[in-house]
Image (cartoon, rainbow, N blue to C red):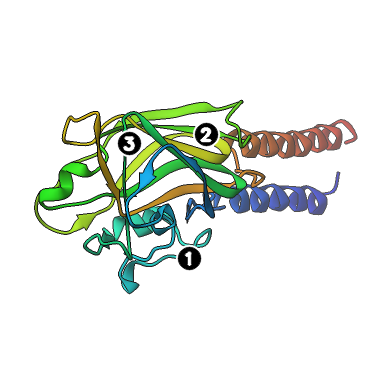
Amino acid sequence: MSNLFKRLLICMAAGILVTCWSMPALALFIYSPKSISDTSFSSSGTTLDRTIDQSGLPDQFKFTSGQTDYKTYIESNPTHAALNQSNAWGGSSSFPGYIDFDLNEVLSVSSFALWGQSGLIGRFSINSFALFGSIDLSFGDDEKLGEFNGSLSLTGPIEVQPFGFDAKEARYIRLLVNSNFTGDPNSFLNIGEVAFGGTPASAPIPEPATILLLGTGLAGLVGFGRRRFIANR
């Protein structure tokens, strides 16, 4: 093997390794569900669509579903306007009760953002809840994403509450509400807005092991060429 060819292989290996290693991690985007597919709650003068249309988010905190970076957005501490019938949802049910959200596509979901309520009626915000993900509308293949507890704010603005969990592929998300902060199993529930953090399910994620394997193969190729060069001398 000529010195020129050997140097070429080394440069190729170094270039590929640097390129792969410098590839950014796949971004996590924020998504608004496209629709409500089912619920056990009864609405009180408003519609659940208000929880997924950003109607209560000030202009500076509105986002583009599927394009805005989730982490950057959450770190901006987005707040929700005071809840009313035009920008939020209120309903009643016996707990536990559920709301099913349709993301309109299969995503690898790993985060949930919730805006509840504050002030004296903040007690009607979500307290204990669980999330389930499914590819199937009937939730026949559902998988629990996690169990969580919301926070109660009696004063100040309505701040976002972010929750994280292991990434799961799902199109439909079930929000199972176990209780609000009143402790009453037959009570009201208020929700300002919900959103999810995820990535397209088909998007490949660069893995360090794959990069290492590529580098090892190229290094081996260079070594093999060097041994042949020495043997032919």
Asked whether, in this view, residue 176 is left or right of residue 9, the answer is left
Residue 28: percent from left, percent from top: 48, 50
State yes or no: discs 3 and 2 in contact (Cβ < 8 Å): no
Disc 3 and disc 1: Cα gap in Å?
32 Å
- First in residue order: circle 3 vs circle 1: 1
Residue 108: percent from left, percent from top: 56, 41
State yes or no: discs 2 and 1 in contact (Cβ < 8 Å): no
Write the residue at 34% across / 73% down. Answer: 59
Q: Secondary structure at mark 3?
A: strand
Q: Secondary structure at mark 2?
A: strand
> Callout 2 environment at 10 Å: few (<14), some (14 to 19), or many (20+)?
many
Q: Which residue is mark 2?
A: 133
Where 80 falls versus 189 (above or below)? below
Asked whether, in this view, residue 124 is left or right of residue 69, the answer is left
Residue nearer the viewer, 193 or 113? 193
Write the residue at 63% across / 34% down. Answer: 136
- First in residue order: circle 2 vs circle 1: 1
Write the residue at 24% across / 59% down. Answer: 83
